[in-house]
Amino acid sequence: FLAGEEPGAYICVYPFVRSLEWYLLPDEERRRMLSEHGMAARGYKDVRANTVPAFALGDYEWLLAFEAPELHRIVDLMRDLRATDARKHVREETPFFTGPRVAVEQLVAALP
């Protein structure tokens, strides 16, 4: 919504916490890993990544949300991102909340 784009048909939201070691690595090494991570995502221009800082708001550092027109695009992106060196420095990334985007009215109507 901040980028002025239409929302994706599917969304995946999850919390994210880096390893303690991540913050002790030299800046250049972290920069290299984040660059590799970004390069792994370049084939997924149809997937919008939204990153919200959550420091001091709870137990997580970040809340991540991925939106895409098709669910398999999010799944494929996540698989590719897990093959990067930055993956070694993930402490927590669960639970995942994934599904189709629905209007609030649809959600309320589906409640028991």
Image (cartoon, helix red, strand yellow):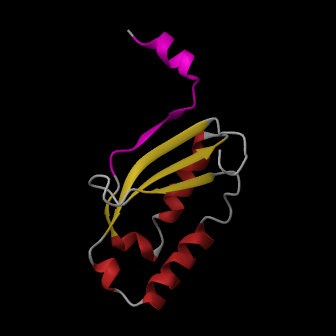
User: Residue drawn at (61%, 64%), measured in percent from left and top?
Assistant: 41
How many marks are shown on the rendered structure? 0
* Magenta stretch bounds: 94-111
Which of 107 and 69 lies nearest the eye of the viewer?
Answer: 107
- At 69% from the left edge and 51% from the top edge, which residue is drawn? 3
In the rendered structure, the answer to whether residue 52 lies left or right of residue 44 reads left
| For residue 104, above or below residue 37 | above
Whole-percent x, y for residue 6 in the image: 72, 40
Q: Farthest residue in the front direction?
A: 56
Image quarter where the N terminus lies is top right
Work out whether residue 55 or residue 20 is closer to the camera in this orientation and state it. Answer: 55
Q: Is residue 97 above or below residue 30?
A: above
Where is residue 46 shown, x and y percent of the image? Answer: 70, 51
Residue 53 image position (x, y, % from top left): 44, 59
As drawn, is 12 to the left or to the right of 72? Answer: left
Q: Nearer the viewer, residue 83 or 16?
A: 16
**Whole-percent x and y of residue 59?**
26, 54
Judge whether 21 appears above or below 57 on screen. Answer: below
| Image quadrant containing the C terminus | top left
Question: Going 42% across and 13% down the picture, which residue do you hit?
Answer: 111
Residue appearing at x 45%, y 64% in the figure: 82
Tell whether position 97 is magenta: yes
Q: In which quarter of the image is residue 24?
A: bottom left
